[in-house]
Image (cartoon, helix red, strand yellow):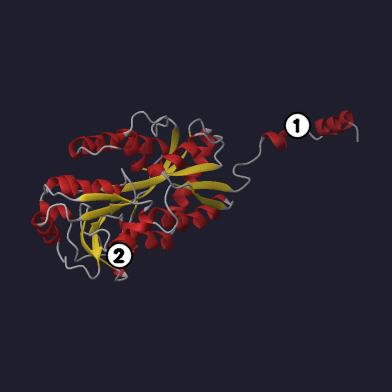
Amino acid sequence: MERRDFLKIASILGASPFSSWAQTSFPDKPIKTISAYAAGGGPDVQLRQVAPYLGEALKQPIIVENKVGAGGVLATQFVAQANPDGYTLLLGSNIQLIQKIMKPELSINPLTDFTPISNMYSSPTVMVVAADSPYRKVEDVITAAKTNPGSMNYSSGGIGTSAHIAGATFVALNNLKVTHIPLKGSVEIAASLLRGDTQFAFPIAGTGVPLAKGGKLRALAVTSKNRLAQLPDVPTLNEIMKNELTIQESWFGMWAPAKTPPDRITTLFQGISKALSTPTLKTAYEEAGNIVTPSQSPQAFATYMNSENKKWTEIIRLTGITAD
């Protein structure tokens, strides 16, 4: 059929011959979500848990890809530079905000280079030691560190991570001489404790709670405002130290590259909201010590991110943490 004949038939039918191309529904292919965390770590596990529910809501597969390194900077840069078509997303968190606070020279700015879609869940950190450790209370760690200054180490998944900041806050408020050991990812924290390379750590609850309940680690305290239902006998650090700086909770949400079309952001937001309302997923998150926290709208998530940026700026300033 010649092109003019095709156009003539289309006009008779009352439709543009190109309308099906111009109005392709979103999404019409798999969506890639980037994790800045090592496979097996708490945030990565939670992302993989939500992926099938989000895929069902959006009617497309959700592919999880890990890009670990530089405290989340590599993953952040990758997604910021991706095509803003809604098919490449980032598991964003306050960690990326903190990285920018500590290193203002970074070319990527989480507040301007991304379009927030929705928050998903929050997680405190858990102060843990090896299950066979002699330290059974927070006070035992403080006493040991003060008795032998410089003899203890604490680990984290990297500089500027939640585990690092919580540990540094604990050390600073108690005037301890303890060495920070940054590892390649949060998944390595437990192994470090079990080998005896480090004596305590503050992994996020998504990592720490399952290990504590499984008997590999012993939980001494949590950095949430209230005790966790999964660890009801474990006190909050604020109960012990009476300082609100110890109340630290990380949050994790979905971001898209800046300039992603608003209608696609709306579709993604609706998909995330539907996925997070699934009882099975909510239970799985809560059993790991997380709190499901969907945003009311993408705009509400953007407002929340700005307020969080101010909060963590103050925490970094007060604790003196630097990226060096």
What residue type is disc 1 on?
A: Ser
Residue at the spot 54% in from the left edge and 53% down from the top edge: 55
Packing grade of label 2 (10 A; few <14, some 14-19, many >=20) is few
Which residue corresponds to the image point at 12% horizontal and 53% vertical from the top-left?
Answer: 149
Identified at 23% across, 71% down, the residue is 132
Label tally: 2
Q: Secondary structure at mark 1?
A: loop
Does any portion of residue 308 appear in the rendered image?
yes
- Give percent across and percent down for residue 247: 20, 48
Q: Which mark is residue 16?
A: 1
Q: Could you tell me which secondary element the residue under label 2 belongs to? A: helix
Packing grade of label 1 (10 A; few <14, some 14-19, many >=20) is some
Image location (x, y in percent) of residue 2: 90, 32
Q: Which residue is mark 2?
A: 195
For the residue marked with disc 2, what is the amino acid? Arg
Q: Is residue 228 above or below residue 88?
A: below
Q: Earlier in the sequence, mark 1 or mark 2?
A: 1
